[in-house]
Amino acid sequence: MPLVFIILCAVGIYYSGKPASFIINSVIERLGRNCFLVVALIIPIVAGIGLNFSIVIGAMAAQIALIFITDWGIGGIGGVGLAFVLSTIPAVIFGYLVGRLFNRAQGREMVTGLITGFFANGIYQLVFLFGAGFIIPIATNAMLLPRGLNPDGTHRLLGLRNTINLREIQYALDDLIRLPQPQGITIPYFTILLIILACLFVVLFKKTKLGQEMKAMGHNLHIAEVAGINVKRNRIIATIISTVMAAWGQIIFLQNIGTINTYNSHEQVGMFAIAALLVSGATVSKATVWNALFGVLLFHTLFLTSPLAGNTLFGEAQLGEYFRVFVAYGVIAVALALHAWKGKKKV
């Protein structure tokens, strides 16, 4: 699979018609804002849970925090730091609840995580579409939707708008460390440092006693349980870590984008992060930090160049858009089919 994507990326770059500096700069930007989310998937895979489609719930926790710091008018690195703290609290709670659910759905965690994400998305949209400005106090009227008039003639404001501007924290992490930049290329040094720290955390965590227990669980859950490992507790811990890292990854992503699409920004987080991991050769049961980094590089290079190549070859950039969405879902479908086939073969 990696070889196929390398070839597709090479073809896309060749036919994109863009200079190398543009491709490199755009890919570095995408690496900075997406790698943390992909790294968040590794620990559940190590623990034998598989692909954690429920990281979308961690992304929701991040957006809840960003909505509040935007309403409070807290910008810059202080606002981002507060968002990290605020998002951690619901992310831990959500991760614990999802972990408990995974323990009840042992062997079917991936489809459970996917459906749980859809269910949580419905609750999230209900809360902020009808609760913001009514149950949840929002002081910034510009963030709310007008819903007719009150008896006194003023606008009745209820529910968050579809888009919230994050201009007060945009690039707060990316521009925190200012070092000389190569000509024509912008490197988000501090964001890359955070990604390196996340990778080191995963590598060092796997060497701890808890990490070794999770690796044993990933090899054979039944044997790990017989050996006295607290399997249920460890699975919950793995899910919590993944959910918290996903929340932080979404904050890194959105501070680079500069806006929140209130009801949609989180929806494709799980799908695209999982697809990026799988294109590197990772599987449902085995993934490393290098898989995450290489996968993001391949996946987002293709995502960047396919519409450009489609426009050059066929005069229609939308063909490239369709192709990259097909690739994202196709990679996941192939990985899950192979996993099911291997499981059936073992039986």
Image: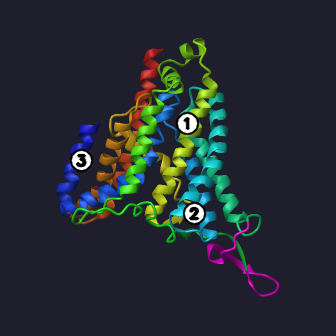
Q: Which mark is residue 8?
A: 3
Measured Cα–Cα span from mark 1 to mark 3: 29 Å
Q: In this image, 44 relative to 230: left or right?
A: left
Q: Residue 275 carries which label?
A: none
The amino acid beneath tag 2 is Thr
Instruction: Report the front residue among 301 and 165.
Output: 165
Is 16 magenta? The answer is no
Nearer to us of marks 3 and 2 is 2
**Where is the N terminus found, in terms of image quarters?**
top left
**How many marks are shown on the rendered structure?**
3
Q: In this image, 241 relative to 141: left or right?
A: left
Q: Residue 44, how many percent across, how many down?
A: 51, 33
Is 151 magenta? The answer is yes
Measured Cα–Cα span from mark 3 to mark 2: 33 Å
The amino acid beneath tag 3 is Leu
The amino acid beneath tag 1 is Val
What residue appears at the point 56 percent right and 33 percent down from the top-left corner?
238
What residue appears at the point 33 percent right and 62 percent down from the top-left corner?
318
Does dot 1 land on a helix, a strand or a loop? helix
According to the picture, the residue beneath numbered tag 1 turns out to be 111
Of the numbered discs 2 and 1, the one sitting upstream in the chain is 1
Instruction: Report the front residue among 331 and 74.
Output: 74
> Could one spot residue 319 in this view of the protein?
yes
Does dot 2 land on a helix, a strand or a loop? loop
Q: Residue 262 carries which label?
A: 2
Instruction: Report the front residue among 183 and 261.
Output: 183
